[in-house]
Amino acid sequence: MTEAQTKTEITFEDFKTEVLNDYKIATISRECSLLGRREVLTGKAKFGIFGDGKEVPQLALAKAFQNGDFRSGYYRDQTFMMAIGQLSIQQFFAGLYGHTDLAHDPMSAGRQMGGHFATHSLDENGNWNNLTQQKNSSADISPTAGQMPRLLGLAQASKIYRNVRGLEDLTKFSNVGNEVAWGTIGNASTSEGLFFETINAAGVLQVPMVMSVWDDEYGISVHARHQTTKENISEILKGFQRDEENNGYEIMTVKGWDYPALVEAYQKAGAIAREQHVPVLIHVNELTQPQGHSTSGSHERYKNAERLAWEAQFDCLAQMRIWLVDNNLATAEELEAIDEQAKKEVLEGKKAAWTAFVSPMKEEQQELVSLLNSIAETSSNKVFIEKYTAELASIKEPIRKDIITTARKVLRLVVKESGKSQLATWITNYINKIQPKFSSHLFSQSDKTVLGATTVAPTYDESAEDVDARLVLRDNFDAIFNKYPESLIFGEDAGNIGDVNQGLEGMQEKYGELRVADAGIREATILGQGIGMAMRGLRPIAEIQYLDYLLYAIQIMSDDLATLQYRTQGRQKAPLIIRTRGHRLEGIWHSGSPMGMIINAIRGIHVLVPRNMTKAAGFYNTLLEKDEPALVVECLNGYRLKEKMPTNLGEFKTPIGVVETIKEGSDITVVSYGSTLRIIEQAAKELLEVGINVEIIDAQSLLPFDVNHDCVKSIVKTNRLLVVDEDVPGGASAYLLQQIIDEQNGYQYLDSQPQTLAAKAHRPSYGTDGDYFSKPSAEDVFEKVYAIMHEAKPEEYPSLY
């Protein structure tokens, strides 16, 4: 694929060549869309969503897009990716088929449906490429407007690199902040709150962001009159237009079929954003969608004849042809020749992609057929095996489901025969080979994985006195910001006052407003700032004031951050640290512990639940040496408790995935985390008075949990298990129980039923009594443990009730 070019000084012939090359790229893209739809309808691909009708504005965008720039877009941008030289015809179809080899589908190795694009920020070992020497696309996601928060962070990184000292050596990430983040979105998706939140935040922050709205008047079948006030997004955003006295946006409107106007608009927008760090909104209207929204339906059902006729006339490719002929840049015959050549190249690319896709599976099919024929010869179920084998062999274009399903069905037929061992070995080897194609890289597989972290204990002076625990956090953050110039923190009240619990006291004054920054009340884009900046080599800490407010950002965490390494098969990463505080304060909105919801929504992000601030500080130190995202939940009621000040601030490290036994015992193992541990410790003292010796284990991290299986080692000794937390029943306590019983096979060592103790199903009520009657108390823990021991030894521990 020929990359789109824009030269500063060119002859007419050079200009003509460039424009005709653009036309060829757009025509190839259109042919890919048309043929791609047919591939879905014939069953070779599962689903198709294409960029037809958006080709010409994407050519203009590509011309303004420079090395080092980043795109954060949505699933219509195939022409742009082709124009920057990052998507070939064969790769387009490989993505459509779901090819699981990065060499064929470099966008996601078949993990995302076609139309979701990405470039490689990392090499095969997880090390950063030089992002300033390539054109970059952050990996797309399908949720509408979900690309917006990340876009904000990608743009803000340029502002940080331009204005923060100490980053001069990070030359593979930025050329002194000269990079622009380019966003794309459909007009209907501008109705989402994430769009408006991001637009507002970018205007406040004044970052180099160019936001393109592709406007074809519809959101699937729903017309703009049901989507947008005044049916015009640029009209209602006029209040964001900058003026001589106020910062804001530069807002442009351009018709999507007007090639020269589009080129001019994008060149101007790029220059403004790049040089002035001013955000720009480009409303590209009068676009069409020739094949409708996707392969799941027809747009003839909801567009009238007049609209369809208009779309045929103002199709951007049709209008570009007219412009080329009218300006003597090409004859109709020359354009027809380009069209025919494009069709030929697309057809050839499609065939090559399909051959590459099915060939490995045909080889696997033949391998299994040969094995099954051999096994059938000596089997008493020969007739049935031959039937399965013939059915598999008759599939002209098998998929791996066909292959492995057949093998597993035949295994049942030979379970008591000599062929079992050979077939079982084949199945095991096949799954071990194939499963990683679909399941690898949920977490980092580089040498910077958190599981390789070295534990470093905090050290203390003999004369160390107790201090408020918040001071341990504060002084450790001070050490972090001094050690890592690429680190920064931001959130609600994080800057001027040093966070609501004073864990950042004095840090903004010392390190400046860009590195220790206040943010508006906009949790989703706080997360987005962090994701985007982490994708560009910075080490951001995004602060969400309270755990309950994390729900505003959970969609971005779940759909974007948690899946990033997975959906790029390890070729992009965002080692963002999310800092928040939770557990036991006051009332419904400030004392929640919805850990079950969180851990089940954000697999791919580590969830760390330190019981005190020294442990929390150690987690931050560990994470900054590694390359994975994590959520750290500090204990709300722990900031004023006393802890000793370590002497090795910034250096001690809390291990991730490792539990800690904080009290040894012999009668029952109690596993918990966070603030609840203090209540369990109180109950354990009282239980000891009646002869029950509790072993208390601090989980420390929920994702990952107890990689060394220390909990089951404790159960071997105590033979009893209670899991306690302050989430709702069936929340994180159920997860911990499953991990210990299923994953660690703890069931075989139990003499009593394993149990959980959680909070009530409702949110906690306000006040001290509300806390007592909503969440586990020391008395609840005492009585739960006592009841378990009563069942085991009723004479020694008579029933309390």
Image (tube, rainbow, N blue to C red):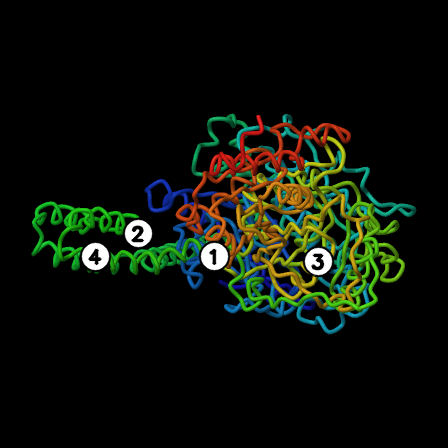
Residue at numbered disc 4 = 423
Instruction: Identify the residue at horizontal 55%, vertical 62% (top origin).
Output: 451
Which x, y percent locates residue 262?
A: 66, 50
Instruction: Name the kind of residue labelled 2 in the image.
Output: Arg
Instruction: Name the kind of residue labelled 1 in the image.
Output: Glu
Residue at numbered disc 2 = 400
Cβ–Cβ under 8 Å for marks 4 and 1: no
Query: What distance separates the C-alpha of mark 2 from that of mark 3?
Result: 42 Å
Do we see residue 312 in this rendering?
Answer: no
682 relative to 503 in the view: left or right: left
Do we see residue 590 in this rendering?
Answer: yes
Which x, y percent locates residue 352?
A: 35, 59
Q: Earlier in the sequence, mark 4 or mark 2?
A: 2
Which x, y percent locates residue 618?
A: 69, 60
Compared to residue 42, the image places residue 373 above or below, namely below
Q: Earlier in the sequence, mark 2 or mark 3?
A: 3
